[in-house]
Image (tube, rainbow, N blue to C red):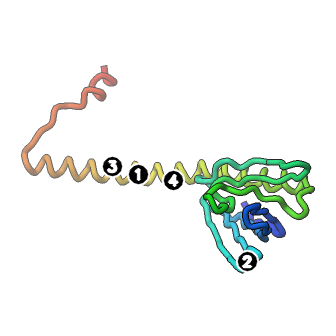
Amino acid sequence: FESKEYHNLACCIPAVLCCNVVSIYAGPDEATLKNDSCLCIKSQKKVPYGELAGVGEESCCCFVGFSAGALSPSGDGGQQLSIYPGTGCNADYVREIVEELKARQYHRGDAARMRVAETQNAALARIEGKLDLLLQNAGISLPADPVVEDMQR
């Protein structure tokens, strides 16, 4: 995937009656949300695609927006806020962002989980090898693994 940027997104926070200017940067392995509020508060949140959940289109009255799961800005009570690009009336733009994030979530998220699983399996194999050597040097023999014996029959 190439990096993509989506600017001029806004999310309204009813409790503060303030709109934030939000930008999303879709990088190769993670998405970044930059949030600048009218209260001079700036924040940035990075989320790997494997941890991005709950991406989808949303609507409020006649406005069209989207939720971006863990990437979405949080309100005062910790609730995740929806993002409404521009004036909140551009359904095609919202659909483009949602489809892009979902595609990256699917491809990069699954690939990332596979890399983690492979790393964990390699570490486990090293530990098992060391344990076998320690047991052998100590003169301790373990009974054969019953699962392996059943599979060989």
Q: Secondary structure at mark 1?
A: helix
Identify the residue at image location x=27%, y=48%.
128
Please state which of residues 74 and 125 is positioned toward the viewer in this rendering: 74
Q: Are marks 4 and 1 in contact (CB under 8 Å)?
A: no
In the displayed structure, does residue 127 sit left or right of residue 68?
left
Q: Earlier in the sequence, mark 4 or mark 3?
A: 4
Q: What amino acid type is highlighted by mark number 3?
A: Ala
State the separation of the CA atoms marked 4 and 3.
Answer: 15 Å
Q: Earlier in the sequence, mark 2 or mark 1?
A: 2
Q: What amino acid type is highlighted by mark number 4?
A: Arg
Q: Are marks 4 and 3 in contact (CB under 8 Å)?
A: no
Q: Earlier in the sequence, mark 1 or mark 3?
A: 1
* Residue 76 on image: x %, y %: 64, 62
In front: label 2 or label 3: 2
Reading the image, the residue beneath label 3 is 125
In front: label 4 or label 2: 2
Reading the image, the residue beneath label 2 is 39
Identify the residue at image location x=91%, y=49%.
62
Q: Residues within 10 Å of mark 2 (few under 14, many from 20)?
A: few
Q: Earlier in the sequence, mark 2 or mark 3?
A: 2
Reading the image, the residue beneath label 4 is 115
Question: Considering only vertical position in the picture, is 110 above or below 20?
Answer: above
State the separation of the CA atoms marked 1 and 3.
Answer: 9 Å
In front: label 2 or label 1: 2
Question: Considering only vertical position in the picture, is 109 above or below 141?
Answer: below
Reading the image, the residue beneath label 1 is 120
Q: Secondary structure at mark 3?
A: helix
* Residue 147 on image: x %, y %: 30, 27
Q: Are marks 2 and 1 in contact (CB under 8 Å)?
A: no
Q: Earlier in the sequence, mark 4 or mark 2?
A: 2
